[in-house]
C-alpha cells in the first residue's frame, strides 16, 4: 500500500481535485499521508498484533494454560465514503488485510474519479483473488448487502447506516458503523486575546479547512456566551479572509460541494427564512460552481433543520448562552456526537464536560487531531456510530479474539460416594481460598 500511494501520488491528487476540489496540501494531509502512515504502522506492528497472548487462569484450574489468539473474520465488506474517498476507503482495507481477511471494497459512487482510480489500480498492487474492488451505485450496494458477509465496515451517513445495519441483521453479521452527527465546539471566553487568535484559526481550520465542512468530525455548531459572540464573529471573519482571501470562490484551498443534490440540501437549510435572517457573515452561493461561501449564522432557530440535522457543509451556526456551563446541558440533551471540542482553561469545566456528556471523543483546546492519533481509538457512540479503528484498534476491529484453554489429564477427582462429594466440595473451596490468598500476597508485594 505504501508503494501504491507513492507511485500514484499525483494521480490521486488529480482525482481528488476533480471529485471534491481538494488542494494537494489538503489531499496529502487528509488522504495520502493518512494511508502511508497507516500502512507503515501495520507493517511494523502486525507480527506483534497477531501473536497469541497469554491468558491468566485461577489457581483452581491448575495445571492449565490459556491464550487469546486473534483470527480473521473471513470475507469482509468495506464501504467507503465520498468526502475522503482515498483514506477512508484504504485505511480500513489496510487493517482488514493485516488481520488476514479477504476483502470486497466498495468505493463511493459519489466520488467517481477516485472510485475508478481505485478499481483500476488496486489489482495491480494487491492480490485480486483476495481483494476485489466493485464499483456501482445504489443498486450495486443493495445487491452487495443482500450477500452474507463475515464483517461489514461502513463509513457514511446515519440514514444509510441504518440500511446497512438492517441488511446485516438478516445474516447476524457484525458491523462497524462510522457515522457522524452534530459535533459541537464550546468556546469559553476566559482565554486571553493571544489565545483567541489561535482558537479562531483552529475553529476555521476545523470547520472549513477539511473538505469545506463536508467531514464527519468537522465542527457542526459553536456554543459561546452571548456577551462574547460579536467579538468572536469578527475574529472568525478575519481568519476566514486570512485563510481564503477576500473572495474564497477564487481560492484553490477551498473545496466545492460534492454534487448538486448536496448543494440543494445545503441551500434548503440556508434558505429557511428564519435561518437566512440569522446570517452574520457570508451566505453567497454559486450553483454553477457548486460553491457556498464560508457562512456564520447567529442563533438560528433550535428547531430548524440546520440545528436538528448534521450540516455537512460550510455553514456554522453560533448558539449563545448566558453562562458557558449551560453548554453541558445543551449537548447532553441532544443525540450523542462523534466529537466534542472545548476551548477552555477551566479544569472544573473540563471535568464536567467529561463526566456529564457522552461522545465518541473529546478534544480540549484543539480540533481534529484525535483523528490522526493511532494510539487513540476513533469511533462514535449512539447515533454517531459504533465500533472503533486506527492503529491496533483497526486490527482488533477486523479480528475475532479466540479464547484457548488447555488442561492435562492429572489430577482428576472423581465423585464416588456422598462423603467423597462432600470432600470434593471442600477441596474446591480450599483451592479458591488459596487463589485469593495468592492474589492478596501479590498485591502486598506490589505495594512494597
Image: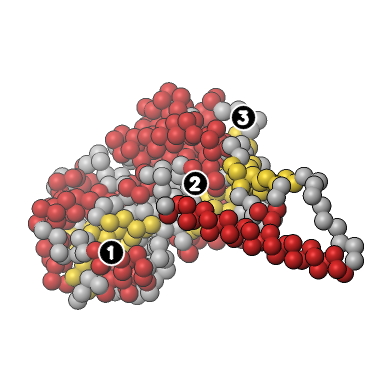
Q: Is residue 66 left or right of residue 78?
A: right
Visible in this render: residue 344? Answer: yes
Residue density around tag 2, few if under 14, some if 14–19, many if 20 or more, within 10 Å: some
Q: Which mark is residue 305?
A: none
Vertical position of residue 300 compared to residue 259: above or below: below
Check disc 3 and report its element: helix, strand or loop.
loop
Looking at the image, is mark 3 or mark 2 earlier in the sequence? Answer: 3
Q: Position of residue 177 (x, y in %)?
A: 52, 54
Q: Quadrant of residue 34?
A: top left
Q: Which residue is mark 3?
A: 128
Q: Which residue is mark 2?
A: 393
Looking at the image, is mark 2 or mark 1 earlier in the sequence? Answer: 1
Residue at figure coordinates x 53%, y 30% from the top left: 122
Residue at figure coordinates x 40%, y 65% from the top left: 358
Q: Position of residue 56 (x, y in %)?
A: 61, 50
Q: Which residue is mark 1?
A: 350
Q: Position of residue 213 (x, y in %)?
A: 32, 52
Residue nearest the observer in this picture, 215 or 202:
202
Residue at figure coordinates x 55%, y 32% from the top left: 47
Residue nearest the observer in this picture, 256 or 207:
207
Depth check, mark 3 against mark 2: the one in front is 2
Amino acid at each position: 500500500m505504501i508503494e501504491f500511494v507513492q507511485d500514484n501520488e499525483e494521480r490521486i491528487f488529480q482525482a481528488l481535485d476533480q471529485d471534491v476540489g481538494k488542494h494537494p496540501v489538503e489531499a496529502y494531509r487528509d488522504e495520502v499521508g493518512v494511508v502511508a502512515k497507516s500502512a507503515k504502522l501495520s507493517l511494523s506492528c502486525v507480527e506483534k498484533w497477531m501473536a497469541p497472548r497469554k491468558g491468566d487462569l485461577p489457581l483452581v484450574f491448575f495445571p492449565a494454560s490459556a491464550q487469546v489468539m486473534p483470527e480473521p473474520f473471513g470475507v469482509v465488506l468495506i464501504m467507503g465514503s465520498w468526502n475522503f474517498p482515498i483514506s477512508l476507503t484504504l485505511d480500513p482495507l489496510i487493517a482488514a488485510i493485516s488481520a488476514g481477511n479477504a476483502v470486497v471494497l466498495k468505493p463511493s459512487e459519489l466520488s467517481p474519479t477516485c472510485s475508478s482510480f481505485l478499481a483500476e489500480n488496486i489489482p495491480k498492487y494487491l492480490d485480486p483473488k483476495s481483494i476485489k474492488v466493485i464499483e456501482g451505485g445504489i443498486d450495486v450496494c443493495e445487491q452487495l448487502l443482500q450477500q452474507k458477509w463475515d464483517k461489514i465496515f461502513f463509513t457514511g451517513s446515519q440514514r444509510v447506516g441504518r440500511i446497512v445495519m438492517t441488511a446485516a441483521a438478516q445474516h447476524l453479521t457484525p458491523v462497524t458503523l462510522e457515522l457522524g452527527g452534530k459535533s459541537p465546539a464550546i468556546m469559553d471566553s476566559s482565554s486571553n486575546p493571544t489565545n483567541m487568535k489561535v482558537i479562531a484559526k483552529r475553529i476555521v481550520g476545523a470547520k472549513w479547512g477539511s473538505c469545506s465542512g463536508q467531514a464527519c468530525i468537522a465542527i457542526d455548531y459553536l456554543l459561546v456566551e452571548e456577551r462574547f459572540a460579536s467579538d468572536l464573529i469578527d475574529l472568525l471573519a478575519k481568519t476566514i479572509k486570512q485563510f481564503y482571501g477576500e473572495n474564497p470562490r477564487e481560492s484553490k484551498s477551498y473545496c466545492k460541494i460534492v454534487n448538486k443534490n448536496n448543494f440543494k440540501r445545503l441551500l434548503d437549510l440556508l434558505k429557511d427564512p428564519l435561518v437566512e435572517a440569522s446570517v452574520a457573515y457570508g451566505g453567497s452561493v454559486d450553483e454553477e460552481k457548486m460553491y457556498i461561501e464560508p457562512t456564520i449564522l447567529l442563533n438560528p432557530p433550535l428547531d430548524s433543520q440546520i440545528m436538528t440535522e448534521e450540516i455537512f457543509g460550510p455553514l456554522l451556526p453560533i448558539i449563545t448562552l448566558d453562562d458557558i456551563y449551560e453548554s453541558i446541558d445543551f449537548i447532553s440533551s441532544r443525540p450523542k456526537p462523534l466529537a466534542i471540542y472545548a476551548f477552555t482553561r477551566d479544569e472544573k469545566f473540563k471535568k464536567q464536560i467529561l463526566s456529564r456528556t457522552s461522545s465518541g471523543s473529546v478534544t480540549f483546546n484543539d480540533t481534529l487531531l484525535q483523528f490522526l492519533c493511532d494510539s487513540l481509538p476513533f469511533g462514535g457512540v449512539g447515533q454517531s456510530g459504533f465500533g472503533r479503528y486506527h492503529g491496533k484498534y483497526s486490527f482488533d476491529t477486523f479480528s475475532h479474539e479466540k479464547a484457548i484453554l488447555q488442561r492435562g489429564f492429572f489430577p482428576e477427582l472423581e465423585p464416588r460416594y456422598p462423603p467423597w462429594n462432600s470432600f470434593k466440595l471442600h477441596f474446591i473451596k480450599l483451592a479458591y481460598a488459596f487463589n485469593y490468598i495468592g492474589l492478596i500476597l501479590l498485591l502486598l508485594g506490589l505495594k512494597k
